[in-house]
Amino acid sequence: MKIEEVKSTAKTQRISVHTHIKGLGLDENGTAIQAAAGLVGQELAREAAGIVVDMIKSKKMAGRAVLLAGPPGTGKTAIALAIAQELGNKVPFCPMVGSEVYSSEIKKTEVLMENFRRAIGLRIKETKEVYEGEVTELTPIETENPMGGYGKTVSHVVIGLKTAKGTKQLKLDPSIYESLQKEKVETGDVIYIEVNSGAVKRQGRSDNFATEFDLEAEEYVPLPKGDVHKKKEVIQDVTLHDLDVANAKPQGGQDIMSMMGQLMKPKKTEITDKLRKEINKVVNKYIDQGIAELVPGVLFIDEVHMLDIETFTYLHRALESAIAPIVIFATNRGRCIIRGTEDIISPHGIPLDLLDRLLIIRTLPYSRAEIEQIVKLRAITEGLHIDEEALSTLGELGTKTTLRYVVQLLTPAALTARINERTNIKKEDIEEVGALFLDAKSSAKILTQNKDKFMK
């Protein structure tokens, strides 16, 4: 019997632009602090997001969705990421962009459903019989190869495990020796071996070796307490999409034809509704038995106006299902045509019947003082030194152009300062790079003035 661990296929969160955001920056009463946890201003939007977080935590948000609406560069994505930070690492957060649904290999609704399932977590608690301890001995015992020839084969492996209470020497199957090699287990590592399946899990290096000089950064764990042979509660966090993928893979034989068949398949294979229903049945059974707990996460759909009428209709059904995550939409559009229709104009390009379901949070343009605070925060995050005069120049420029434009000027200005053999950014650096790089409004103005020189 071969037992495989379900590996997580969670998308990594987008980094760089919003790395400085650590939470919503609210006090104990839920009131927004002007500048906290990496967020500046937008007090009303942050307080509304705080209420949404409370509703999610108390599980009163199922089947609902939130819309973050506001002009470009007013912190919509930042607030969505802050909500994810407030909910913690164990709650799945799946970011996507509206245009991701358009693929030549896979249906639009399938992409949406896949992301829905990525945003729903399952915490599985199992009590397993295990041998746990620090490895004191690891000796493979070899015998002559039964197939003949010169090579030798491992008949069994002797392993010594030590805990705070005692030691045990175990004689294990050769298949477990392969698992030990895969996990790169050495003497001095803390491991546990499941009795029923023979699965090996390396937990880290024993803290007895923490004082030794080691080039590789290691995670040191304390010596396990109690006996070597014990019952242990193992908690595993997976998403429903992980379970879908694990069960969708063809479990063909080990012959070359089935291997080739798996390689020839397209990279994206559609997971059927039938398979998902079967997985839901098993999941519901586990929840009823108390083995597992459902953790609805957050699906963040940026640029939601890029979805079309078909996907909006599908979203309705998906939001109403028993197992649904909390969906956060974001858009910077005003009244525009719903994609996929000829002439139906709607606020934010979202059908009115879906808009009725949404809690709408407005984000407002930043003031000059707030732009200066954000630029200062970004400079600290990027490890740059900026003069007060340069900061003031960027704040003034930000009110005329956009926040995104002035934040993008930081790195070129730092390079200009370095060329001039300075470590801090001055006003003249900002003016120099400002003359080199245009903002969108200036570019549009030049296009209008010289429209006869450009091709139509």
Image (tube, rainbow, N blue to C red):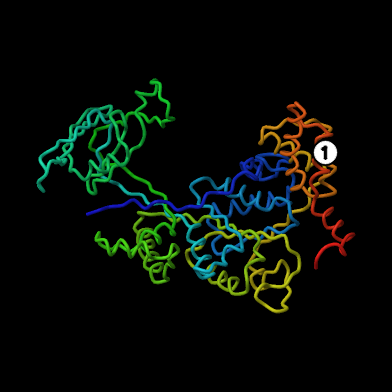
Q: Residue at x 40, y 62 (%)?
A: 244
Along the viewing direction, whichever of 178 and 95 lies nearer the viewer = 178
Q: Residue at x 27, y 39 (%)?
A: 180
Secondary structure under badge 1? helix
Looking at the image, is 279 positioned above or below residue 138?
below
Position of residue 362 measured from the top left corner of the image (x, y, whole percent): 73, 57
Q: In the drawing, does residue 40 fall left or right of residue 227?
A: right
Of 306 and 76, the residue lying toward us = 306
Left-right relation of 112 to 358? left
Query: According to the image, label 1 marks what residue?
Result: 432
Which of the 4 image quarters holds residue 395? top right
Q: How many marks?
A: 1
Quadrant showing the N terminus: bottom left
Up/down of 163 relative to 341, above or below: above
> Residue 286: horizontal and vertical position, in percent?
35, 58
From the image, which quarter does the C terminus lie in? bottom right
Q: Is residue 450 left or right of residue 20?
A: right
- Residue in the image at 79% along x and 30% along y: 387
Determine whether 182 is above or below 51 in the image: above
x, y (%) of residue 87? 55, 48
The outermost residue toward the right is 449
User: Which residue is painted at 77% across and 44% down in the image?
Assistant: 406
The part of the image, by quadrant, that contains residue 143 is top left
Closer to the camera in the image, 425 or 365: 425
Dot 1 amino acid type: Glu
